[in-house]
Every structure is written in structure tokens, then in C-alpha cells.
Amino acid sequence: MKFASQISGAYTMEITEVRVFVKEGQDRKLKAYATITFDNAFVVRNVKVIDGNKGLFVAMPSRKLKDPCPKCGFRNTVRSKFCNQCGGSLPQVEPRMPLATDDMSKQSEHKDIAHPITAECREYIQKKVLEAYEAEMKRGPSPRPAEAMPYREPHRTVEEDNDIEL
């Protein structure tokens, strides 16, 4: 694999493509999703462009943390009060450190799936994604590509379902 450049003696990969999918809707903080390609060989999806208190920033893809139910073992979202499987009451676990705001509370319920290790890498990713976001915003609204649209089953009528030949 060919590495693009060196930063502080460590090899880094080059971002070869950034695709931005502007988010429309009522969530005012989440502005867009992005897909980043490194060295035309590795893709990271669900990178988020968020409008925070200090301006736009990039959030890496994450997943909700889950805790098992003591009765049935079903994995429920952290801070759930009841099990989604058996309906049993779940023990309420105190946060490890006091949380000052609601935003910090939401962060502690999620864990990054992929993230940069160095500040230089984080800045590089953020710069490239925000540049692509700004370019997409200047381009204006356009029809979404098929790959960005969620898959939906085609609508079928009862008559069509009954016309199936065996």
C-alpha cells in the first residue's frame, strides 16, 4: 500500500474522496453525513457534520452502548429503565463522572467506531470534510444519488399479492 505523506515521522494515508449528503429535516445540529475514502482503498461511512456551539465540526461514526438485562440477557441501550425483551426493571447505573450538560450525557451513551488517534489526523479529516461540505452547500440542492437513499420495498397491492402463480 502506498502512503501519501509523513507527519511527525509517522505515515498517514491520504483522503482521496469525500462524499457529502446534506441532511434535510428538523434536526438543526446535524447538517450532513459524509463518507471518506482513504488511499482509494478504505472507506469510513456515517461521519457527521454538526453545527455546535463553536461552529461546524466533524463527529466520527459511533454506536450506542448497551447493557445486558440481568433477567434475560437482552442487550438494552444504556440508561434504559426497562428491558425491551422481557419488560423487567433494569438497574440504574450511576455515570462514572458527573455530567454537566445534556450533550455530554448523550456522548457518554455512544462509543466511536473509528476515530483518529492524533490531533493532526483529526484536523486533516475535519478540514477535508468541512471543505467538501461547504462545496456541497454552494452547489445547492440537487437530487440525492440512489446509493444515498434508503431502500424501500416497492408498494404492492393486495391484488398483486394474490396474483402470484405457483
Image: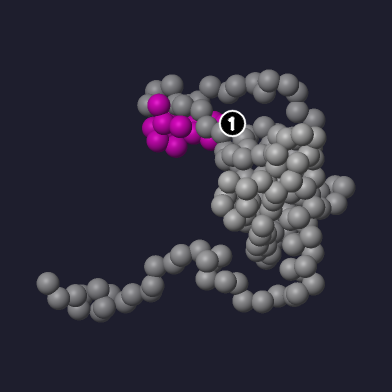
How many marks do you count on the picture?
A: 1
In what quadrant of the picture does the C terminus appear? bottom left
Of residue 147 and residue 90, the one placed in the foreground of this image is 147
Of residue 98 and residue 139, the one placed in the foreground of this image is 139
State yes or no: residue 8 in magenta.
no
Q: Is residue 117 above or below residue 18?
A: above
In this rendering, would 19 be left or right of 152?
A: right
Residue drawn at x 74%, y 55% as measured from the top left: 129
**Residue 99 in view (yes/no):** yes
Residue drawn at x 53%, y 35% as measured from the top left: 77
Of residue 119 and residue 162, the one placed in the foreground of this image is 119
- The figure's colour scheme reads one colour
Q: Which residues are magenta?
A: 73-88
The residue labelled by disc 1 is 79
Predominant secondary structure in magenta? loop
In this rendering, would 29 be left or right of 150?
A: right
Residue drawn at x 45%, y 26% as measured from the top left: 69
**Residue 51 in view (yes/no):** no
The x, y position of residue 26, in whole percent, is 69, 61
